[in-house]
Amino acid sequence: MAESVETIPTESAQVSCDGGGGALGHPRVYLQIKPEVGEIECPYCSRHYVLKPGAAAGADGH
């Protein structure tokens, strides 16, 4: 059986991921969600980031 992958809804098209495990996580990476796709997967831990409905396209959280 495949491991459950965490899905994280976000309002920002730019997200950072460190695996969430503190010292047991992975190096922090910054990921850019393409508005036309609406989602991205972390290449280290496979966390799945999904833009929330109504999130501003191109929002970078700043």
Image (cartoon, rainbow, N blue to C red):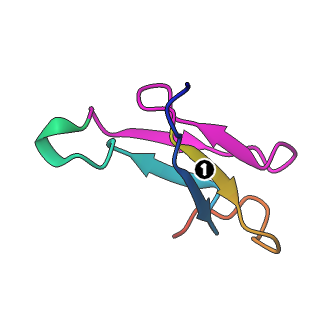
Q: Is residue 28 magenta?
A: yes
Q: Amino acid at mark 1?
A: Tyr
On screen, 32 above or below 50?
above
Look at the image and tell me in which quarter the N terminus lies.
Answer: top right
On screen, 22 above or below 40?
below
Residue 48 pos. (x, y %): 59, 44
Q: Specify the farthest residue to the left.
A: 23
Q: Secondary structure at mark 1?
A: strand
Side of 31 relative to 38 (left or right):
left
Question: How many labels were placed on the picture?
Answer: 1
Residue for badge 1: 49
At a point 71% along the width and 46% down the height, the residue shown is 39
Residue 42 pos. (x, y %): 51, 34
Front in this rendered view, residue 11 or 62? 11
At a point 12% along the width and 41% down the height, the residue shown is 23
Residue 11 pos. (x, y %): 64, 69
Task: Please identify the dominant SS of the magenta region.
Answer: loop
Q: Which quarter of the figure has residue 17?
A: top left
At a point 51% along the width and 52% down the height, the residue shown is 15
On screen, 25 above or below 1?
below
Q: Specify the farthest residue to the front.
A: 1
On screen, 9 above or below 25?
below
The magenta segment? 26-46
Q: Is residue 37 magenta?
A: yes
Residue 51 pos. (x, y %): 71, 59
Q: Specify the farthest residue to the right.
A: 36
Other-residue count near label 1 (Cα within 10 Å), few / some / many at <14 / 14–19 / ≥20? many
At a point 65% along the width and 40% down the height, the residue shown is 40
